[in-house]
Amino acid sequence: MTKKIFPKNFLWGASTASHQVEGGTTNQWSVWELSHAAELAKTAEKRLGNLPIWKDIKSRAQDPHNYVSGSGVEHYSRYKEDFDIVKQLNLNSFRFGIEWARIEPSQGEWDENAVAHYHSYIKELKRRKIEPVLNIWHWTLPTWFAEQGGFKKSENLKHWQHFVAKIAEEFGRDLNYVITLNEPNVYTASSYLNGQWPPGEKNPLTFLWVYWNLVRAHKYAYKILKAKNPRLQVGIAAQLANIQAKRPHNFIDELVTKWMRYFWNWMFLRRIRLQQDFIGFNYYFTDYFKGVRRHNPQTPLNDLGWYMEPEGLYPLLIRIWTRYKKPIMVTENGVADAGDEHRRWWLEETMVAMERAISEGVDVCGYFHWSLLDNFEWAYGWWPKFGLVEVDREHGMKRTIRPSAKWWAEEISELQQD
């Protein structure tokens, strides 16, 4: 790579989500985990038995404890240690979440100890000269909010606004970047269309209504945050895919591809185009459509069975830039790879894709790898390993930097010296 292609102020970072790493959370997800763990363990072979690594994960995937977040990886108490690792990896930024259920465990009642914790959290990042990038909402809800219907009811948006106002008041002056929502398309589809996540509904009309309410939630949050601190750069973390026709120039394949690109990639972003200062997105998938069905190559696959095409980031960056002409932040990007066989290749191809886009005039301002630490992967539980840092939960939560992360740290160091 031409080392000087990345701007000096480029954000090199890693991402986390509060529920997935902190431990000890009580929210709608932790309640759902306890009631569904046995079922998920029982159906594991049916759901996962075709994965190439099934024999390696079988015992864990069939253990109900796998599906309970529990103590997490104790990031809530060990964040200083983890920030030292961020610094050791030569990263200059870090994306994190504030757990709504922690700071407002009961409606209208703030836990000031939790608020103080997150003040300390941000302070420690800044002390190490690590740019804090706050993600306000990453799929988890206080139980009281979920019991009232969550984002399914428009009248509940007043509670969201109350929460965001508290975030703005407490932390708005300490931040430069805020992400309001993480992957609203994935959340609505998984929770209200295919019913795989809480509350487990399968209703297309409810899906569309929650989707619309999340559009409104972002717009409300944008207004509140900018009013408190006009210099804040505010966006979302959409989940975008590099969607392609399996047979170029085939009418049906091209038609389905255009529809899927709009429905999955652009529909939400289009509705908030005036309320975002940068385009934040998460990239994991390149999907090929043959007719109305996804028809991806069978190799290479990551541990979750997802087809891997890291260079697919490039055409996606070009499409985003063409549509919006705003700074672009890759807010998540990574690979489930317990053996650390693919991560270096993934990182290298990803950096080349960004370099190519930047060289063509695309304003890519940051990249955040998913994830810093091995963490709780929602309905999959603990067995998928996305971390730059391995966490041994059976031996004192020991942190070990993976070889691919050491390689990446050296690459970033060279880039920062140019």
Image: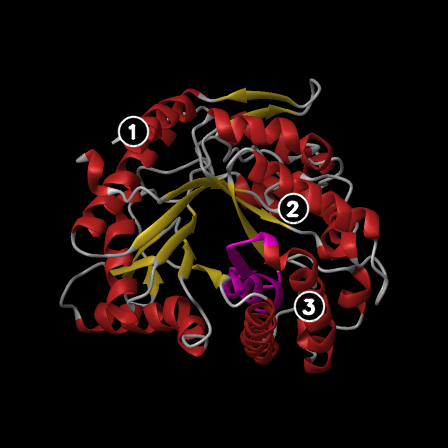
Query: Is 144 left or right of 79, judged from the image as shown?
Result: right
Foreground tag (2 vs 3): 3
Q: Which residues are magenta?
A: 174-195
What element does badge 2 sit on? helix
Snapshot quadrant of residue 261: bottom left
Q: Identify the residue at image location x=18%, y=73%.
A: 251
Residue 342 visible at all: no
Percent position of residue 221, x then y = 59, 70
Q: Amino acid at mark 3?
A: Ala
Q: Identify the residue at image location x=45%, y=31%.
A: 337
Q: CA distance from mark 2 to mark 3?
A: 19 Å
Neighbour tally class for label 3: few under 14, some 14-19, many 20 plus, Cα within 10 Å: many
| Dot 1 or dot 2, earlier in sequence | 2
Percent position of residue 113, x then y = 82, 47
State the residue lying farthest toward the top.
395
- CB contact under 8 Å: marks 1 and 2: no
Query: Is 46 left or right of 63, judged from the image as shown?
Result: left
Q: Which residue is mark 1?
A: 417
Q: Identify the residue at image location x=53%, y=59%.
A: 179
Q: Nearer the viewer, residue 120 or 155?
A: 120
Q: How is the rendered protein coloured?
A: secondary structure
Q: Which residue is mark 3?
A: 165
Query: Is 208 left or right of 71, judged from the image as shown?
Result: left
Foreground tag (1 vs 2): 1
Q: Quadrant of the N terminus?
A: top left
Percent position of residue 315, x then y = 23, 56
Q: Which residue is mark 2?
A: 18
Q: Nearer the viewer, residue 33 or 89?
A: 89
The disc at residue 166 is none
Q: Amino acid at mark 1?
A: Gln
Is 297 magenta? The answer is: no
